[in-house]
Image (cartoon, rainbow, N blue to C red):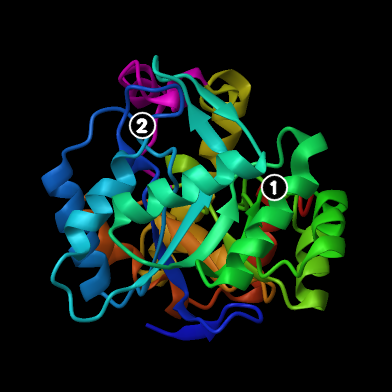
Amino acid sequence: MERVKLGQTPFQISRVGLGTWAIGGGEYQSGWGPQDDEESVETIHAALAGGINWIDTAAVYGLGRAEAVLRVALQGLADRPFIFTKCSQRWTEDRVVYSCLKRDSILEEVEGSLTRLGVDCLDLYQLHRPWPEEDLEEGWATLADLKAQGVVRAIGVSQFSLAQLEIAGSIAEVDTLQPKYSLIDRTVETEILSYCDSRGIGVITYSPMGSGLLTGAMTASRVAALPPDDWRGRSPDFRGPQLQRHLRVAERLAAIGRRLDCSPGTVAVAWVLANPAVAGAIVGFRSAAQVASLLSAPEIRLAPGMLAELDEVTGGSG
């Protein structure tokens, strides 16, 4: 798989990365429902065999479960992929998630992630959310200190606004940004991606397939059958008029996919990767069977007419 430099970091990454949010399973408010750990390990191995060389995770995914599963999957591998993880999302004993950017909290979190992952250094450490905003400077300064100490090799942020990126950048260089970006959420397209591109900030996007909405497999009946601990069943994106709008985009992706002999999800990922500001797209595989069809996304070249079709059905940028 094609590899590109991630901003000004030392990493040459595959255009597609493996996301482990869904691998964390359910049983908390942002979970994805039941997930078998052995199947998750098989999925990780299939992704690495297919050329993926980086894995994005977070302490909060499964409340530590995703990082622990990743450790099992990576044991004994001669060539370890880059590991990108996140902090600032904590949880209580009764599994309620909350945000904290205090220095002592982050220092505790990084030790927890190092232990669960079984590594001595993290390749990329990211602030998961910019909340509470009044502690943003403290949180980002803490990550900068961890980088200076060699505990982490690079530092980044997730879901930051332009103003928040500027605040962080005034304290220490922002190596990467992880924004939500897909055909059904183009909010970052104009200002934020341009800002990152002009400053050499590496961009790795999440939810390029709209958390399953753009795969071609989602239907209203499938949404209705989602398990109670799958957050998507509670999301406005998966209900009513919004769901119908998103499924119309998926139909257009399917039509283009038939012309290109690939799946709607592959076209959705290829569209994200067509933006020159995007280095890589995070894809949340849940089974080894899902891996093969999406690994070709970096090779798909969407013709101008196809891009225009997708602009038409999504209403353009923004």
Q: Nearer the viewer, residue 119 or 204?
A: 119
Q: Nearer the viewer, residue 119 or 54?
A: 119
Say what secondary structure mark 1 lies in.
helix
* Residue 196, percent from left and from top: 76, 69
Depicted 177 relative to depicted 88: above or below: below
Viewer-side label of 1, 2: 1
* Residue 52, percent from left and from top: 34, 73
Give the extent of the magenta segment: 215-234
Q: Which residue is mark 2?
A: 32
Q: Between disc 1 and disc 2, whose residue precedes?
A: 2
Q: CA distance from mark 1 to mark 2?
A: 28 Å
Residue 178 seen: no
Depicted 173 relative to depicted 183: above or below: below
Dot label at residue 139? 1
- Residue 233 inside the magenta-drawn segment: yes
Horizontal relation, residue 76 to residue 12: left or right: left
Horizontal relation, residue 307 to residue 193: left or right: left
Question: Pointer 2: residues within 10 angstroms few (<14), some, or many (20+)?
Answer: many
- Residue 167 inside the magenta-drawn segment: no
Horizontal relation, residue 40 to residue 57: left or right: left
Residue that appears at 58% across and 55% down: 126
